[in-house]
Image (spheres, rainbow, N blue to C red):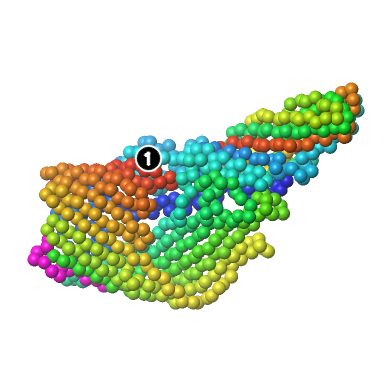
């Protein structure tokens, strides 16, 4: 993902959006389009022995945000995402969580911001995991800063059969950010 | 408070919209009630037609106007405008509209303020901005402000001759958008690869002073209200400061809109020239005003033209170019030429007017061009005893029709007038309605 370019894009858009006067600025950001093909969109899951479980984190990823939002109030942040799990063998369940933080080091230190549905794993098959929901308001202030860090954590619980060659690949991630526009 | 580029853009838009506001501004409720038309031999007629200096004073001609600023009371009572950027009611467009419509007149209908949401859709190869109702703020053609102004006019006269000096300010500052950028902002079109999005700034400012010698008088006719009046004034212009520039500033989008290997790259080149030492070496030039007025009983018409042949020669100007350099990722300034002579023109301004009086009704029409665009006013006034009723239509500098209606009472030397008029002195070009009140001393 090209963080700088996304930031520039948002900055340019924010400048134009001042024209709305007293209203909201709504950013619909296709985060996945920036991650796709970079390697950050896929979490490789090591073999999970039968009946055991574990978590795998991808490296935190920073996203530049529009400058000048420090006086703004983020009204809501809603996310919609989708990941696809493939494996050679295995059964069990899988879900993923998103983490947000103001710096890289603490990305995974707090509670998860939002969790996906839990999905049963199909042996040697493909399983789609969906995520939808709003962030808790306490995290909204992160989106008034110049940069936010995003982490994806995969939770895998094996059933009676070990999970091998698991890959959890992001196929969609969209953010819908509603900002009260105080750009001065 | 911090200011950002968007705020600067808003200021430019505000200034652009302020042009028609300034051009039609008057405290006189009689003029407001006729959509800006003046039926008397004052105001714009004396400013633009040198012959009106010699015409006899009409009995309806005011000595001076005392505005009654009911708008101030309204502003104090009703305004919810806040300058606190942290207040949830803070709205820069409402503030801009306040600047464009200073609270002198009572606002019957305030100009609408866009308060819609704006949606920005962003992806690696996608950028769409939907301004919603605020699209009306994006100009459809070059937006600019300026005109040819005479700021002071001090002098004295003897037997029709007048020796005077005035300060002049001629400016035309504006900007345009190329078709791609306009479609992106106005029509919500997605940003396209391999496309250039440009702002096209341009402008000229010249200022100085002009000693003048003029004459105005009646050259034919049996009595003061029947005859031909002529006027002419010669100006010697001394230019004190001058600057002019134009160019292109924008972005080129390459294969992918937001990609590290094909990121949008700035483009731009602006040429500008200015006086090397403002006030040190005057620009010089000659020009003149001419005008005539015909008074023929109930009919009166005239034409005045200003700054005919006004060309100023600036002996020492520097020409520079600021061009975006991809190597240094910055605009680099180069001197194209130094201490070169430059000639500029002061735009011709004019007024043409006709009035016709029949019984108690006076009809009037005029065309005014203050050096940029032409405004047209048509109106009428009828008087029955102390009562006057007025109405008018105008086409403003934005080519929008405006309407006026008013009335007044006159008791001897004192008159009380009220006028209602529409205007588009706001960022959205939609009409507001004001009520002006004034006392007239005859």
Which element carries disc 1, helix, strand or loop? loop
Q: Position of residue B270 (x, y in %)?
A: 54, 64
Q: Decide if residue A71 is on the left or right side of residue B148.
A: right
Residue situated in front as seen by the camera: B243 or A40:
A40
Q: Residue furthest left?
A: B222
Task: Please name the residue that numbered disc 1 is placed on.
Answer: B110
Say whether residue B213 is magenta.
Answer: yes
Which span of residues is magenta-colored? Answer: B212-226
Q: Decide if residue A32 is on the left or right side of residue A166.
A: left
The image shows a total of numbered marks equal to 1
Say whether residue B177 is magenta.
Answer: no
Q: Position of residue B302 (x, y in %)?
A: 22, 62
Helix, strand or loop for the magenta stretch, by majority: strand
Q: Position of residue B136 (x, y in %)?
A: 46, 45
Q: Quadrant of residue A86?
A: top right
Query: How many other residues sit within 10 Å of disc 1, few (<14), some (14-19) or many (≥20)?
Result: some
Q: Residue at x 42, y 57 (%)?
A: B145
């Amino acid at each position: 993902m090209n963080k700088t370019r996304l930031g520039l894009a948002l900055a340019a858009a924010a400048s134009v959006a001042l024209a709305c006067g007293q209203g909201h600025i709504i950013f619909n950001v296709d985060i996945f389009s920036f991650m796709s093909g970079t390697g950050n969109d896929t979490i490789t899951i090591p073999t999970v022995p039968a009946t055991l479980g574990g978590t795998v984190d991808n490296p935190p990823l920073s996203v530049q945000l529009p400058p000048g939002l420090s006086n703004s109030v983020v009204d809501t942040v809603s996310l919609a995402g989708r990941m696809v799990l493939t494996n050679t063998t295995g059964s069990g369940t899988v879900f993923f969580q998103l983490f947000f933080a103001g710096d890289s080091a603490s990305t995974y230190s707090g509670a998860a911001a939002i969790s996906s549905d839990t999905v049963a794993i199909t042996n040697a098959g493909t399983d789609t995991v969906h995520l939808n929901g709003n962030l808790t308001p306490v995290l909204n202030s992160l989106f008034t800063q110049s940069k936010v860090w995003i982490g994806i954590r995969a939770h895998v619980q094996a059933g009676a059969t070990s999970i091998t060659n698991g890959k959890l690949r992001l196929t969609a991630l969209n953010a819908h950010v509603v900002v009260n526009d105080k750009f001065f | 408070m911090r200011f950002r580029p968007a705020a600067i853009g808003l200021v430019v838009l505000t200034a652009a919209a302020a042009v028609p506001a300034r051009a039609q501004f008057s405290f006189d409720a009689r003029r407001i009630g006729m959509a800006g038309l003046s039926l008397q031999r004052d105001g714009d007629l004396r400013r633009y037609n040198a012959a009106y200096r010699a015409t006899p004073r009409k009995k309806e001609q005011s000595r001076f106007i005392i505005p009654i600023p009911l708008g101030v009371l309204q502003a104090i009572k009703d305004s919810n405008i806040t300058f606190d950027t942290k207040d949830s009611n803070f709205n820069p467009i409402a503030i801009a509209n306040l600047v464009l419509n200073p609270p002198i007149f009572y606002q019957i209908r305030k100009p609408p303020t866009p308060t819609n949401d704006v949606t920005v859709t962003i992806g690696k190869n996608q950028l769409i901005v939907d301004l919603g109702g605020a699209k009306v703020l994006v100009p459809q053609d070059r937006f600019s402000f300026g005109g040819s102004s005479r700021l002071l006019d001090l002098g004295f006269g003897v037997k029709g001759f007048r020796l005077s000096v005035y300060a002049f300010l001629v400016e035309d500052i504006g900007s345009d958008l190329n078709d791609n950028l306009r479609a992106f902002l106005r029509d919500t079109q997605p940003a396209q690869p391999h496309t250039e999005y440009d702002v096209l700034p341009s402008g000229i400012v010249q200022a100085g002073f002009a000693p003048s010698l003029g004459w105005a008088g009646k050259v034919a006719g049996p009595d003061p209200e029947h005859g031909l009046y002529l006027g002419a004034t010669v100006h010697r212009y001394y230019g004190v400061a001058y600057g002019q520039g134009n160019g292109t500033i924008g972005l080129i989008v390459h294969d992918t809109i937001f990609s590290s290997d094909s990121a949008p790259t700035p483009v731009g080149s602006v040429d500008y020239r200015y006086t090397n030492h403002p006030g040190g070496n005057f620009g010089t030039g000659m020009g003149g005003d001419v005008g005539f007025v015909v008074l023929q009983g109930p009919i009166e018409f005239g034409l005045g033209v200003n700054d005919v042949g006004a060309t100023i020669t600036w002996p020492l100007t520097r020409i520079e170019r600021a061009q975006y350099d991809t190597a240094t990722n910055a605009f680099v300034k180069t001197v194209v030429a130094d201490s070169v002579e430059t000639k500029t023109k002061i735009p011709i301004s004019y007024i043409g007017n006709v009035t016709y009086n029949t019984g108690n009704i006076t009809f009037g029409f005029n065309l005014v061009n203050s050096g940029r665009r032409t405004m047209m006013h048509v109106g009428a006034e009828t008087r029955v005893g102390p009562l006057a009723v007025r109405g008018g239509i105008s086409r403003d500098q934005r080519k929008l029709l405006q309407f006026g209606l008013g009335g007044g009472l006159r008791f001897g030397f004192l008159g009380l007038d009220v006028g209602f008029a529409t205007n588009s002195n706001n960022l959205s070009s939609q009409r507001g309605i004001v009520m002006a009140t004034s006392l007239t001393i005859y």
